[in-house]
Amino acid sequence: GAVVSQHPSWVICKSGTSVKIECRSLDFQATTMFWYRQFPKQSLMLMATSNEGSKATYEQGVEKDKFLINHASLTLSTLTVTSAHPEDSSFYICSVHGRGSYEQYFGPGTRLTVT
Amino acid sequence: DAKTTQPPSMDCAEGRAANLPCNHSTISGNEYVYWYRQIHSQGPQYIIHGLKNNETNEMASLIITEDRKSSTLILPHATLRDTAVYYCLHRGSTLGRLYFGRGTQLTVWP
């Protein structure tokens, strides 16, 4: 399967600052990338879908101005949490999907803690 | 939105087969059934997927009922490393989107 990396693996930031999380598809051209969020002891919640060459599509209830997504290339997507607050503390996971593929591969996740 | 139903937890003895059920009665005719698992604090790992025929790979077997309203994931010889949350999903209306339900916490004990 495809190898997906995320950077950083964990980050601690102060309230009010912005944090950028990178998702890279190392050996797979990802025409579509997805961002999920997972709170402790809960399931993954899809935040947004990012397609190559177009703007991200956000799920209902997810603020697009707070969670900025840039699908820079077929191998890189970034999620920026702007003006982070403690309630944004969560496990953020990206996944990649290739054209014509039925499989979706997930990154290892990024643990964000906002103090 | 997640449209599958799974038992919240199951136990299995090491070396025995683990059979994880899933109900997906609202699945559409062209939707695949997917299974993923998530070990604590890691990203989900793809296990297997199928449309209507039974499938087998090096990790597991997938048995889909003839009416496609339910399926069973079989880990033939469970090990301690198989302890994880197992998610059954079927693809949403838009290609690629996966909506996760609560999954089944499988605990394999020695």
Image: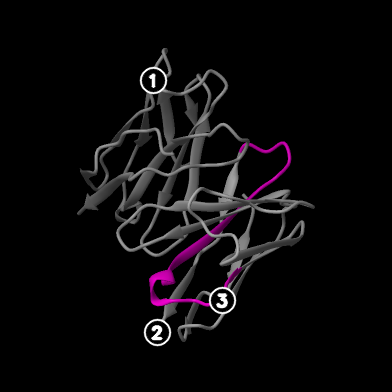
Whether residues under marks 1 and 3 lie with C-beta atoms below 8 angstroms apart, the answer is no
Q: Which mark is residue B69?
A: 1
Q: Secondary structure at mark 3?
A: loop
Q: Give the Cα distance between marks 2 and 3.
A: 17 Å
Q: Are marks 2 and 3 on the same chain?
A: yes
Residue drawn 47% across the image and 23% down it: B54
Residue B14 appears left or right of A29: left
Q: Secondary structure at mark 2?
A: loop
Residue B27 appears left or right of A107: left
Residue drawn 70% across the image and 45% down it: A98
Residue B36 appears left or right of A72: left
Percent coordinates x, y for residue B5 in the rendering: 32, 33
Q: Give the Cα distance between marks 1 and 3.
A: 40 Å
Q: Which mark is residue B50?
A: none
Q: Residues within 10 Å of mark 1 (few under 14, many from 20)?
A: some
Amino acid carrying mark 2 in the image: Thr
Tell me the subunit letter for badge 3. A
Q: Are marks 1 and 3 on the same chain?
A: no
Magenta range is A80-102
Location of residue B11 (image quadrant) = top left
Question: Where is mark 3, residue-wise?
Answer: A8
Q: Which mark is residue A115?
A: 2
Percent coordinates x, y for residue B47 in the rendering: 48, 42
Can residue B67 be seen at all in this image of the molecule?
yes
